[in-house]
Image (cartoon, rainbow, N blue to C red):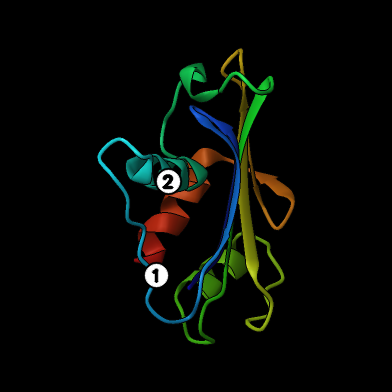
Amino acid sequence: MLQHLAIKNYILIQDISVDLSDNFNVFTGETGSGKSMLVDALNFAFGRRSSASIVGKYDNVSRVEVIFTVADNHPVIPYLEEIGFDVDPSDPIIISRDMNRDGKSNARINHRIVTTSLLRELARISH
């Protein structure tokens, strides 16, 4: 379950941090207010291909961080263990990705550098 979303310097977003509840969460707003940008940032965090155009004007790097938890029996746990992560289901999983103005991207799971293809696979498994 998604618990936290933090976005810095992503397109028009300067800095936003959202804690989500275990219940129902809704993003509402006028047309053009940035709701889709939040979804795009989430997709970026999970490995979607992007260009340096996502880097906003507020810094030289764009960064998105996602914190979520999974149930003990969730298929993400054996996948992460299979690729070398020590997973405690009671601990949150932290995914972060940043991109600089040159288009160089760094992806991390629990602060360990991983490939974006690994993030895409993690997103596929978590659905």
- The answer, for residue 65, to whether it is visible in the render is no
Q: Secondary structure at mark 1?
A: loop
The amino acid pointed to by label 1 is Asn
- Taking 84 as reference, is 36 above or below it? above
What is the crowding at mark 2: few (fewer than 14 residues within 10 Å), some, or many (at least 20)?
A: some
Q: Secondary structure at mark 2?
A: helix
Q: Nearer the viewer, residue 81 or 87?
A: 87
Q: Residue at x 64, y 59 (%)?
A: 94
Using the rendered view, name the quadrant where residue 90 is placed. Answer: bottom right
Identified at 45% across, 48% down, the residue is: 42
Position of residue 88 measured from the top left corner of the image (x, y, whole percent): 69, 79
Q: Is residue 24 at all visible to an observer of this figure?
A: yes
Relative height, residue 15 to residue 25 (above, below): above
Of the numbered discs in the image, which one, if any, rests on residue 85? none
| Tag of residue 38 | 2
Residue at the spot 69% in from the left edge and 22% down from the top edge: 59
Q: Residue furthest front?
A: 30
Check disc 1 and report the residue beneath it: 25
The residue type indicated by label 2 comes to Leu
